[in-house]
Amino acid sequence: MPTGVLPSIDKRELGAIFLGGALGGLLRVWLSQSFASGPVSWPWAIFAINVTGSFALACLATWFRERPPESTFHHPLWTIGFCGTYTTFSTMQLEILMLMDHDRYGLAAGYAFVSITAGYLAIWVGSALVRRKRAIV
């Protein structure tokens, strides 16, 4: 790419990402505040958000890859926008540090391990379900 030349930006795609991001972020904040846990217990809200978000992203990405929608804005709206702001692995890291600050090292390690394992399992299950449904249909 020549120096000084910016790539073209599709404002409609950017708007789709913004809208999805607003929806995902608002849902995450509402869930994390509605189901907040204490600083020394298992962070269930963020755990559930990250696992369900990983599942949703796997389903959506697999679906869009195998059945491209007519509109090009569904993919950025739901995957980049919604799932990207709904999931919050940075908050998971902060919760791990908070558990460690309260000398809950075992719980912190368990939370990290189970969160990552459950996230990968959710991705595998989500992709498999979409592919299975495609094979049936």
Image (cartoon, helix red, strand yellow):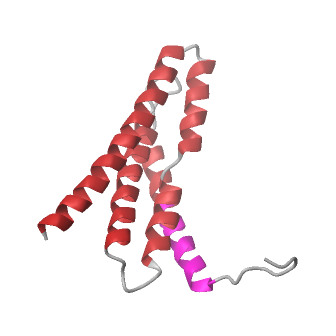
Q: Quadrant of residue 116?
A: top left
- The range drawn in magenta is 10-24
Q: Quadrant of residue 89?
A: top right
Placement of 12 over or under 128, stated as above or below: below
**Residue in front for this viewpoint, 134 or 87:** 134
Residue 134: x %, y % from top left: 20, 67
The residue most toward the left is 136
Residue 112: x %, y % from top left: 49, 29
Residue 76: x %, y % from top left: 50, 72
Residue located 53% across and 65% down the image: 21
Placement of 64 over or under 129, stated as above or below: below
Residue located 31% across and 75% down the image: 67
Residue 21 magenta-drawn? Answer: yes
Placement of 58 over or under 100, stated as above or below: below
Quarter of the image where the C terminus is located = bottom left
Residue located 40% across and 42% down the image: 119
Residue 113 magenta-drawn? Answer: no
User: What is the chief secondary structure element of the magenta stretch?
Assistant: helix
Residue located 46% across and 82% down the image: 72
Left/right of residue 20 with respect to residue 93 in the rendered view: left
Left/right of residue 31 with respect to residue 66 in the rendered view: right
